[in-house]
Amino acid sequence: MSTAMSKKKYYDIAVIGGGPAGLSAAYEAAISGARVCLIDENKTLGGQLFKQIHKFFGSKEHHAGVRGFRIAEELVESVKNEKVDVYSDAVAWGVNPGYQFGVTVGGTDTFICEPKKVIVATGAAENTLAFPGSTLPGIIGAGAAQTLANIRKVRPGNRIVVVGSGNVGLIVSYQLMQAGVDVVALVEAAPAIGGYMVHASKIRRAGVPILTSTTIARAEGTDHVERVVLADVDNKFQPIPGTERTLDVDVVAIAVGLHPMADLCMMMGCETKFHGGLGGFVARHDENMETSLHGIYIAGDVTGIEEASVAIVEGKLAGIAASESLGYIPQAMAKELKDACWASLSELRSGERGEKLAAFKKEIMF
């Protein structure tokens, strides 16, 4: 083993993933007195929150009325104040049963991380959509469109069609309009809008048509997208011949859902289960967010796709539970804190949509 590879760093708790769940978990563990490190593959912590310029819903406890990027700033600052060792632009790899794993920072500096407990908060990745012409330049994910417009201050294009009417598709459509982009239409294969009507109403009032039971038959262009051909679909989501119509656009933003990034959990050997309602394969866990492997905890979208507010609370829960297991939080105090987290999660999962997600989560829990 080389000198670089033989370097070891010891921690009580290692948190993998610097989005809302990971930041929350790292903070809770650090304030308990545990020695904590936070590892994230991006150069900037905060995950998807920094793309979110809209205000959150809910209660004051859940950051109601606060814009997503402001919440990210608060979480990042809290971690820095607690002197968590942060490794950004870093990749965790080669996890073994002893919870040792390699960390490569900046593509060059490598060390072995040896924690007593691990919290996996790797989040989610965008789903893709294949259709004729889908490899043309100008076919991008909704997350890429959001990054360009909200973070890089660059319009992704001039005339855009958005595919997918979940909350991501609806919110990104509105934000693109705020950036001066002409959102020509929002296309949805299902017969009904998938996201909250409050978001759908905003873009409808602005003149954007939401075309349900509709799909992209193909994208056309020479060296980039110049137009898309839409078609109605039947109840089996098959295009109906004779319903094709063309829209002139230079960008197609795909917003057809997310899937949990459970790869690291699988590499570790955690028991996983496929659940379509939660977005794909997820690691099973108990009420402490602990997986089938003792000492490995999970939080956030890696447990199933939900809102950022849920990820923050789940991160807090995992951080408290991991700290308790190491003796940093007395059992009675930990129970009180964890009960408060579950009460908060119940509040966030109220309503028809939330209750359905809560039921899905119970199906994958021990």
Image (tube, grey):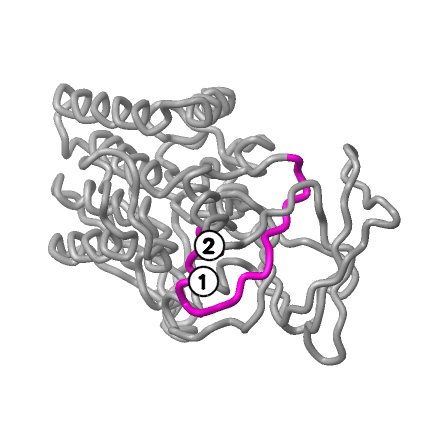
Residue drawn where x is 13% and y is 19% of the image? 332
Q: Which residue is mark 1?
A: 177
Circles 2 and 1, Cβ within 8 Å, touching? The answer is: yes
Q: Amino acid at mark 2?
A: Ala
- Residue 164: x and y in percent read 59, 48
What is the x, y in percent for residue 165?
56, 45
As drawn, 296 above or below 255? above
Task: Using the rendered image of the protein, determine whether residue 205 is visible from the camera's viewpoint.
Answer: yes
Which quadrant, please, contains the N terminus?
A: bottom left
Residue at 44% in and 56% down: 174
The front one of 223 and 212 is: 212
| Quadrant of the image occupied by residue 291 | top left
On screen, residue 90 above or below 215: below
Does residue 341 belong to the magenta stretch?
no
- Classify residue 124 as left or right of residue 320: right
Which secondary structure lies at badge 2? loop
Which of the labelled discs sits on residue 206, or is there none? 2
Dot 1 amino acid type: Met
- Identify the residue at horizontal 54%, vertical 73% (top origin): 157
Q: Is residue 52 left or right of residue 131?
A: left
Q: Residues within 10 Å of mark 1 (few under 14, many from 20)?
A: some
Label 1's element?
helix
Q: Which residues are magenta?
A: 171-191
In-image side of 169 versus 309 (left or right): right
Nearer to the camera, 138 or 191: 191
Q: Which residue is drawn at the image coordinates 30% and 25% (left, top)?
A: 347
- Residue neighbourhood size for the residue with mark 2, other residues' Cα within 10 Å, grouped as few (<14), some (14–19), many (≥20): few
Please tell me in which quadrant of the rendered image residue 4 appears: bottom left
